[in-house]
Image (cartoon, helix red, strand yellow):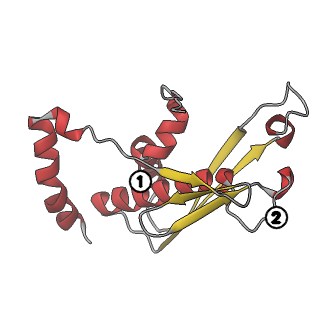
Amino acid sequence: MDAEALKDLQAPIKARYRDNPDAGLIVLKAQGRLDDASIACKVETGRAMAVAGLHPATGGSGAELCSGDMLLEALVACAGVTMKAVATALEFRLADAKVSAEGDLDFRGTLGVDRQAPVGFKAIRLNFELDTDEPQERVDTLLKLTERYCVVFQTLNSQPELSVSVKA
């Protein structure tokens, strides 16, 4: 897809959101079911069933997906798609690009070994490797816009309002 095709694709969507701001508010959903036989949760992805379980650092076998890995994978996926869309819109010459994320997690927190240890990632690093002959100024613009429009990055960065409920 080139910049013109992307613009043509998104123009009516953008116009609808400008004319009717409420149309841009969409509730995304995810759901899963606890596994009967093991410490795992089966998550419906829309394409397949993903089975998440304990990370080996907390006693898991490593056979199931780790939700921490899944969070980083969601960040990589979103940042990669966002970068590709921004690069397309900017007509940015990109021969190849790799996206990676890594996060520091202290499992003492999630296992309750040390109450001072955080539960969750202490730090997350999102990295890009670009094969391009574009000038640094355009690389900087690509990165700035990718960061600005990446939903997962901005969600992690802005600490959204969270709530939890239960029906028993």
Residue 16 location (% of width, % of height)? 11, 44
Q: Which one is earlier in the sequence, the residue at label 2 or at label 1?
A: 2
Residue 142 location (% of width, % of height)? 42, 52
- Camera sees residue 47: yes
In which image quadrant can residue 135 be found? bottom left
| Residue occupying the point 48% across, 54% down | 79
Most foreground residue, 143 or 125? 125
Task: Give the label on residue 147, or none.
Answer: none
| Residue occupying the point 48% across, 29% down | 160
Dot 1 falls on a residue whose secondary structure is helix
Left or right relative to 3: residue 72: right
Residue 80 location (% of width, % of height)? 47, 60
Counting other residues with Cα less than 10 Å from the Cα at mark 2, is it few (<14), some (14-19), or many (20 or more)?
A: few
Task: Give the label on residue 61, or none.
Answer: 2
- Give the residue type that dot 2 points to: Ser
Residue wearing tag 1? 138
Most foreground residue, 134 or 88? 88
Q: Residue furthest front?
A: 168
Name the quadrant of the C terminus: top right
- Marks 2 and 1, Cα distance to the nearest angstrom? 45 Å
| Residue occupying the point 78% across, 65% down | 62
Callout in the foreground (2, 1):
2
Dot 2 falls on a residue whose secondary structure is loop
Left or right relative to 20: residue 143: right
Residue 103 location (% of width, % of height)? 71, 47
| Residue occupying the point 82% across, 35% down | 109
Most foreground residue, 167 or 129? 167
In the rendered view, would you say 163 is above or below 140? above
- Camera sees residue 130: no
Number of numbered discs overlaid on the protein picture: 2
In the rendered view, would you say 49 is above or below 103? below
